[in-house]
Image (cartoon, rainbow, N blue to C red):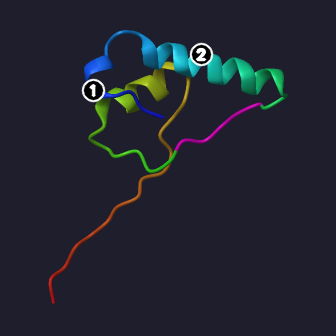
Amino acid sequence: MGVIEKYRMLGINALMHYKTSKKLLSKGYKGAEMFWILKNNVMTNREIQAMGGEIYKTYRIYDYNI
């Protein structure tokens, strides 16, 4: 889930998270998982933590020229 850069910081992401959470809760979901979020994606990681989420797993990709 993401917002095009020129529309960021307008609250669209908060509304998107709210609507999604409300729909999931109404269907009986108790939790969700977000994955493949880069460590340097500060805004998304802050949003996850602000919603009560925790970062519990880190994936790394290494590149090695042979």
Residue reaching furthest bottom?
A: 66
Residue reaching furthest left?
A: 65
Residue 34: image quadrant is top right
Of the numbered discs in the image, which one, if any, rests on residue 18? Answer: 2
In the rendered view, would you say 53 is above or below 12?
A: below
Q: Nearer the viewer, mark 2 or mark 1?
A: 1
Q: Secondary structure at mark 1?
A: helix
Q: Which residue is mark 1?
A: 5
Mark 2 neighbour class, 10 Å CA radius: few under 14, some 14 to 19, many 20 or more: few
In the rendered view, would you say 34 is above or below 11?
A: below
Is residue 15 on the magenta stretch? no
Is residue 65 or residue 59 the one in the foreground? 65
The residue segment tinted magenta is 30-34
The location of residue 64, given as percent across then percent down, is 19, 79
Q: Residue at x 31, y 13 (%)?
A: 9
Q: Residue at x 38, y 27 (%)?
A: 3
